[in-house]
Amino acid sequence: MKNHGAIVRESFIVTIDGPAGSGKTTVSRLVAEGLGFDYVDTGALYRGVAYTAVNANIGLDDDGALDRLCRSLTIRMVREKDGLHIFVNEADVSGKIRTPDISMAASTVSARPVVRRYLLKLQRDLGRDRQAVFEGRDMGTVVFPDADVKFFLDADIKVRAERRHREMTHGHDVTIEQVQEDMMRRDKNDSSRTVAPLKASADAVYVDTTDLPIPQVVDLMIAHVSDRLGQGAVP
C-alpha cells in the first residue's frame, strides 16, 4: 500500500457502505489512515445499542422500551493503541459486540425507527466540521446523502463468509456454513427493510473486492478521493 500522506481540507466526508465481509472495516480504517482522516465505525454504534438492549432484556421490537433506552445512553468512540473502542455509558463494550448473536440483534434494531432516529443525529454530529471516513450500511444513502465521496464495497458471499469466519472472536464454535447462512439472512433483512435498506447510492463508486487484495483496494479508493479533492495528496 502506498503512503499517500495527509490531505488538507477543513471538512470532507467519505462514506463506505456494503454488506458484512466485503472488507469495508479493514479498508475504511486504512483509507482513513492514508488520508489522515478520522475513522468512524457506525456499525459499532448499532451493536452497542443492541448489546445494551439484549443485556437489559428489552425486546428488539419494543419501540417504547428502545426509545427509553436510547434516551438514557451515552455512546462515544475512543481511539486507543490497539484500535477504536466503543464506550456505552462509560463501559467499554468493544470486545463484547462482535458475536454472531449481537450481529443479528444489531441488524434487527437497525430497522427500528426510534433507534435510527437516535443514531442518525449522533452520526451527523460526529461528521460535523471534520475530515472523516464513515463506514456502515446507509452512510451514502441516508446519513450523508451529500457526502463528498461515496463507495459501496461488495464481494462473493462465499468469500465474505470465509473472511468473517476468520475475523470472529476465538471461542465461538461456528462453522463457515453457519456464518454464511447468518450472513445471507442478515443481507436479506438489511436489503429488504423499509427503513434505510442496504443498497448502493446512485452516485457511489462500486468496488468488488472478491479478487482484489486489500492494499490495491485501498490505493484505488485513496486515489479516487485525491482526484475529487482536486489537489492530490500533500507530500
Image (cartoon, grey):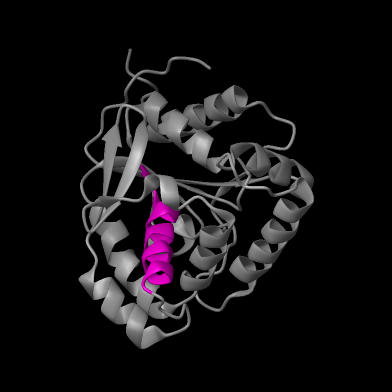
Q: Nearer the viewer, residue 12 or 155?
A: 155
Determine if the magenta segment contains residue 43: yes
175 relative to 89, above or below: above
Residue 173 in percent (x, y) is at: 67, 47
Q: Identify the magenta region.
A: 40-56
Q: Residue 132 falls in which quadrant of the image?
A: top left
Residue 123 in percent (x, y) is at: 31, 58
Residue at x 36% of width, y 65% of height? 52
Main SS of residues in magenta: helix
**Can you see residue 148?**
no
Q: Quadrant of the C terminus?
A: top left
Residue at x 46% of width, y 56% of height? 140
17 to the left or right of 162: left
Residue at x 42% of width, y 18% of height? 4
Q: Nearer the viewer, residue 156 or 127?
A: 156
Residue 81 in percent (x, y) is at: 31, 26
Residue 176 in percent (x, y) is at: 75, 46
110 relative to 164, above or below: below
**Can you see residue 70?**
yes
